[in-house]
Image (cartoon, rainbow, N blue to C red):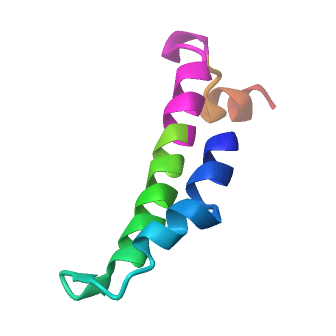
Amino acid sequence: MLAGLVLLNYPLLSLFGTPQLFLGIPVLYWYLFGVWFGFILLVGFTLESHLPPEENRIALDDLEEED
């Protein structure tokens, strides 16, 4: 969360707020979507590493059969 505050705060955003284009898209947009995508990956990897192993997971099919 602290990284989000730092990466999406004024000093760094002003570095990318130039009128330059990369592949026809403003550099600021590339930066914002890159940071956003990076945070999504970080959350995904964090959640995946905290999930129990496959053999310990309860399948939804098993729960339906018990009812």
x 57%, y 40%: residue:
43
For the image shown, how many numbered marks are present on the structure?
A: 0
Does 32 appear above or below 48? below
Can residue 1 be seen here? The reply is: no
* Front-lying residue, 45 or 8: 8
Can residue 8 be seen here? The reply is: yes
Q: Position of residue 3 (x, y in %)?
A: 61, 43
x 36%, y 71%: residue:
30
* Front-lying residue, 25 or 54: 25
* Front-lying residue, 51 or 42: 42
Q: Is residue 5 left or right of residue 11?
A: right
x 52%, y 68%: residue:
13
Does 34 appear above or below 1? below
Q: Position of residue 41 (x, y in %)?
A: 46, 44
Q: Is residue 36 left or right of residue 31?
A: right
Q: Quadrant of residue 22?
A: bottom left
Residue range highlighted in magenta: 43-56
Q: Quadrant of residue 62?
A: top right
Based on the picture, tell me whether residue 44 belongs to the magenta stretch: yes
